[in-house]
Image (spheres, rainbow, N blue to C red):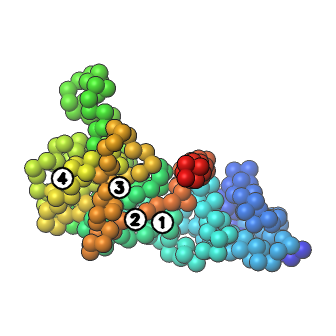
Amino acid sequence: MTEKRIQLDSMSQATTLYGPFDENIKTVERFFGVSCVNRDTEDGSGGCLVVSGSDPLRLSDACQALEYLKNMVKLQDALPSQSVEYVCNMFADGRGDELEGLDSDCVCVTVKGKPIKPRTVGQKRYVEAIRKNTVVLGIGPAGTGKTFLAVAMAVTALRSKQISRIVLTRPAVEAGEKLGFLPGDLQNKIDPYLRPLYDALFEMFGSDSYAKHIERGTIEIAPLAYMRGRTLDDSFIILDEAQNTTREQMKMLLTRLGNNSKIVITGDITQIDLPRGTASGLVEAARVLKDLDDIVIHRFSEKDVVRHRLVREIIAAYEKYEKEKIKKQE
């Protein structure tokens, strides 16, 4: 049995690193097959974490993961369990070096002063793709931050006056019978489909500032049908839930692109709600546009899911089920 020691700087650092009921430490133990024991010191610091294990390589990986998590604690007040799992996953897969610089990239600051940062390598590459390209397609499962990070990038571009307007849009797939049963005028009927976009903007701006931007027209949220016939200059355009666009709708939106504008298109091709036999505009666009300059198709995986751990496991289980079903059909 080999052991290594990790010195902790303060009690508050130790408390955050360990997590509620030592859940973070238990996660490290589970991933690497090691044992972690706290040893108090007389100097008033956070003590010393003694990590022991029978496999020297896995022990080394565990200590590197803990050192990385310790540095994360210095940069933020909390250490979400999802982040701990992700860091352990990366070091267990021998990809810990890819995490370098991840926590230093602040995309935006919310109205409450909270920094918004990429939390996975996939998210960081997505943010970099948006910075460097005119059109980005972000394709991946729920919980990967596709829409939220795109909105954060749009807010940053608006605040720095790189663009003069944010345009957010989604297709309203059920814009037939079901929509007709909802109360109010057309905007009231459409609002439920746009709610995730509202939520993201409220977090960035706060309700008062958001209302002023809406009044001035610097933020526009509208169903996709409202985009027809327009040219969008000096705009950051986000098309959300793009898996539910038809090929005609997708082409229509892409050709709205004006001077000094960006388009970010997000969607999950495993959750297409179009009528049977209708091709998804997002699926087709990913095939048609993949070789064009200044356009990037970024694909997230279940490892980029930053919601509850079970969300990632549910997505992986469904993917496994679909693959097995396809094999049986063959």
Amino acid beneath label 3: Val
Task: Identify the residue position indicated by label 3 in the image.
Answer: 283
Is disc 2 in contact with disc 1, using a CB cutoff of under 8 Å?
yes
- Label 1 amino acid? Gly
Image location of residue 312, percent across then percent down: 57, 52
Give how far apart the Cα atoms at labels 2 and 1 are. Answer: 9 Å
* Residue occupying the far front of the picture: 330
Query: Could you say whether the residue bearing mark 3 is in a helix, strand or loop?
Result: helix
Residue 3: x %, y % from top left: 84, 75
Residue that numbered label 2 is attached to: 298
Q: Report helix, strand or loop for mark 4.
A: helix
Q: Who's the residue at 43% across and 69% down the image?
A: 125
Between residues 319 and 101, which one lies in front from this camera angle? 319
Closer to viewer: mark 4 or mark 3:
3
User: Which is more N-terminal, label 1 or label 2?
Assistant: 1
Determine which of the numbered discs, if any, sits on residue 122 in the image.
Answer: 1
What residue do we see at 22% from left, 33% from top? 187
Position of residue 64 relative to residue 146, above or below, is below
Give the mark toward the camera: 2 or 3.
3
Which numbered disc flags the more N-terminal residue, 4 or 1? 1
Q: Residue furthest right?
A: 1
Q: Amino acid at mark 4?
A: Met
Q: Of helix, strand and loop, which one carries label 2? A: strand
Residue at image point 24% right, 56% down:
237
Side of 284 relative to 87 (left or right): left
Q: Earlier in the sequence, mark 2 or mark 3?
A: 3
Q: Which quadrant would the N terminus be assigned to in this image?
A: bottom right
Front of the two marks 1 and 3: 3
